[in-house]
Image (cartoon, rainbow, N blue to C red):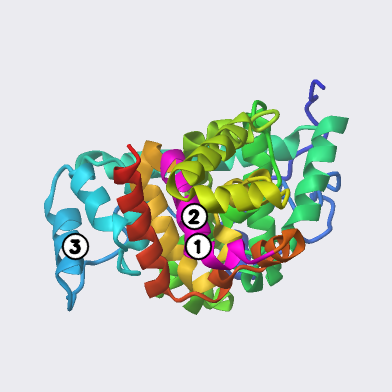
């Protein structure tokens, strides 16, 4: 439905003192004359996104690292006028140091230019552009379809599993909501599909943790300023959009990409372990019963929070090959418990898959599975 501009007078320009005072406040969305009531939780015309353009170069200082990979990464990022993205992918695939993870993710997503001379201007422009996108939505009247979409996002946010504890903070919920809604309206082909909320959260938490130079799970949300929230939100938006672009067919109407991947997982299992395949078939367990959920959320719901950054390292390093990698990762998970599955009936198999042991895995166990995925992918070329 065509959106019409709001016929409302915008507030006057804030004074420097008022702006400074507002900047010090905790992020909030007060109900006053300037708030857009029709989209509860989205930005008001008074409280617009503010972009900290001082953070438009690499936002870290390379430190001393005890391991060779950290030193190689720091050297690659600091001393190269143009970052070698293939070398970066190889280093990140096996895991990235927490202090370097945000900037490496932004490079892999093409958000930070590989050319050092372009970084300052590019980052500033992108952050301002996201501000304008969010403001435009704030000033548009939503059609009925858009309101339904927004309502669905609001329903799904409390159900989010990835970093659930951080979503208890209103500021984070609202940032995730804005990103998902803005992206959905600008990409009507894929719009919003349940599961995207799980994929977006790791970017936001990682980029917020960057301000405190800590791993994501050590983030202290109470210490994040309003300006920092807005910068992380803008960065998350662009990286999230790029990430979904790799998996575009997974989220278009009918989700053909997921269905195709499920078929490939079935074929891979038939080749790798025909006995398990036959047992699942005889028990009436279709690959769609479990692979659809795995592929829709890219396994992020199946692992503990401490494993999420490490898993995302490999995902982002895979680039355009990610859909192919995920299919083989599904195979690895199935083969891991092949012997147990062969002794189970339909109900036991379904219960096992709904609460897999991976939810109690360590990062080391995850890394073994990722390495095995790489080996099997090479085997089944």
Cβ–Cβ under 8 Å for marks 2 and 1: yes
Q: Which residues are magenta?
A: 323-344
10 Å neighbourhood of mark 3: few (<14), some, or many (≥20)? many
In the rendered structure, the answer to whether residue 44 lies left or right of residue 270 reads: right
Question: What separation in Å lies between label 3 and label 2 (alpha carbons)?
Answer: 23 Å
Question: What separation in Å lies between label 1 and label 3 (alpha carbons)?
Answer: 24 Å
Q: Which residue is mark 3?
A: 74
Query: Residue drawn at (33%, 40%), measured in percent from left and top?
Result: 121
Residue 30 numbered tag: none
Q: Which residue is mark 2?
A: 231
Quarter of the image where the C terminus is located: top left
Q: Nearer the viewer, residue 43 or 197?
A: 197
Q: Quadrant of residue 355?
A: bottom right
In the rendered structure, the answer to whether residue 305 lies left or right of residue 26 reads: left
Q: Which residue is mark 1?
A: 228
Q: Position of residue 254 (x, y in %)?
A: 70, 30
Q: Position of residue 376 (x, y in %)?
A: 35, 49
209 inside magenta stretch: no
Viewer can see residue 342: yes
Q: Nearer the viewer, residue 137 or 365?
A: 365
Q: Is residue 161 above or below residue 284?
A: below
Q: Is residue 31 above or below residue 320?
A: below
């Amino acid at each position: 439905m065509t959106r019409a501009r709001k016929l409302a007078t915008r507030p006057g320009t804030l004074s420097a003192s008022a702006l400074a005072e507002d900047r010090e406040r905790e992020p909030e969305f007060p109900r006053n004359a300037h708030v857009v009531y029709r989209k509860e939780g989205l930005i008001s015309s008074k409280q617009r996104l503010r972009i900290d353009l001082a953070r438009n170069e690499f936002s870290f200082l390379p430190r001393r690292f005890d391991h060779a990979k950290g030193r190689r990464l720091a050297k690659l990022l600091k001393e190269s006028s143009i970052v070698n993205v293939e070398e970066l992918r190889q280093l990140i695939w096996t895991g990235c140091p927490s202090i370097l993870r945000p900037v490496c993710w932004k490079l892999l997503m093409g958000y930070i230019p590989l050319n050092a001379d372009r970084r300052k201007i590019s980052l500033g422009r992108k952050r301002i552009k996201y501000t304008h996108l969010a403001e435009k939505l704030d000033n548009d009247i939503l059609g009925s379809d858009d309101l339904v979409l927004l309502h669905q996002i609001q329903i799904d946010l409390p159900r989010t599993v990835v970093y659930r504890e951080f979503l208890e903070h209103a500021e984070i919920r609202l940032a995730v909501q804005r990103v998902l809604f803005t992206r959905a309206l600008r990409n009507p082909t894929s719009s919003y599909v349940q599961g995207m909320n799980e994929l977006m959260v790791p970017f936001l938490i990682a980029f917020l943790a960057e301000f405190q130079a800590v791993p994501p799970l050590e983030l202290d949300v109470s210490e994040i300023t309003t300006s920092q929230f807005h910068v992380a939100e803008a960065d998350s938006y662009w990286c999230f959009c790029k990430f979904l672009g790799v998996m575009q067919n997974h989220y278009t109407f009918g989700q053909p990409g997921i269905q195709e991947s499920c078929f490939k997982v079935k074929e891979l299992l038939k080749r790798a372990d025909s006995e398990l395949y036959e047992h699942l078939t005889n028990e009436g367990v279709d690959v769609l019963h479990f692979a659809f959920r795995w592929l829709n959320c890219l396994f992020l719901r199946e692992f503990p929070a401490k494993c999420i950054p490490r898993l995302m390292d490999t995902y982002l390093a895979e680039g355009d090959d990610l859909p192919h990698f995920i299919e083989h990762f599904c195979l690895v998970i199935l083969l891991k418990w092949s012997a147990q599955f062969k002794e189970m009936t339909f109900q036991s198999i379904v219960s096992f898959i709904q609460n897999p042991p991976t939810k109690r895995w360590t990062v080391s166990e995850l890394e073994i599975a990722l390495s095995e995925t790489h080996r099997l992918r090479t085997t089944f070329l």
